[in-house]
Image (spheres, rainbow, N blue to C red):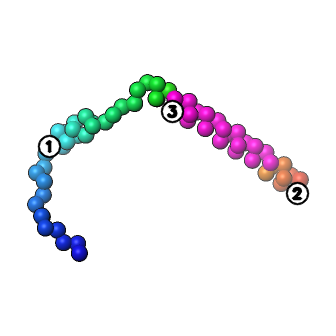
Amino acid sequence: MGETTGTEKAPKKSFFKGLKAEFNKIVWPDQETVGKQTVAVVAVTAALGIIIAILDFIIKWGLSFII
């Protein structure tokens, strides 16, 4: 358990060559996808803001009613 048969390390490449290789693997989204995701984020943010404002109003009204 925990034993490894091959203890040889992979040959070290240049940091920048490895970085360039990783950047070449990135699949960037197209403009339509970015637009849709932006609209979704703005909509969810606005909805959560409204929900928090409503809860704040209810709690404030409840506390003022109790006090």
Name the residue tied to disc 2: 66
Name the residue tied to disc 3: 37
Does residue 39 show up magenta in the picture?
yes
Q: At 23% across and 75% down in the image, what residue appears?
A: 1
Where in the figure is residue 30, as x and y percent of width and height? 40, 26
Question: In which quadrant of the rendered view does residue 21 lie?
Answer: top left
Q: CA distance from mark 3 to mark 1?
A: 36 Å
| Mark 3 and mark 1 residues within 8 Å of each other at the beta carbon | no
Magenta stretch, residue numbers: 36-58
Instruction: Indicate left or right for 19 with 57 as reference.
Output: left
Magenta stretch, overall SS? helix
Where in the figure is residue 18, as x and y percent of width and height? 19, 42
Name the residue tied to disc 1: 14
Mark whose residue sits in front, 2 or 1? 1
Q: Amino acid at mark 3?
A: Gln
- Classify 10 Å Cα crowding around label 1: few (below 14), some (14-19), many (20 and above): few
Q: Is residue 64 above or below residue 39?
A: below
- Classify 10 Å Cα crowding around label 3: few (below 14), some (14-19), many (20 and above): few
Mark 2: secondary structure: helix
Mark whose residue sits in front, 2 or 3? 3
Q: CA distance from mark 2 to mark 1?
A: 68 Å
Q: At 13% across and 54% down in the image, what residue appears?
A: 10
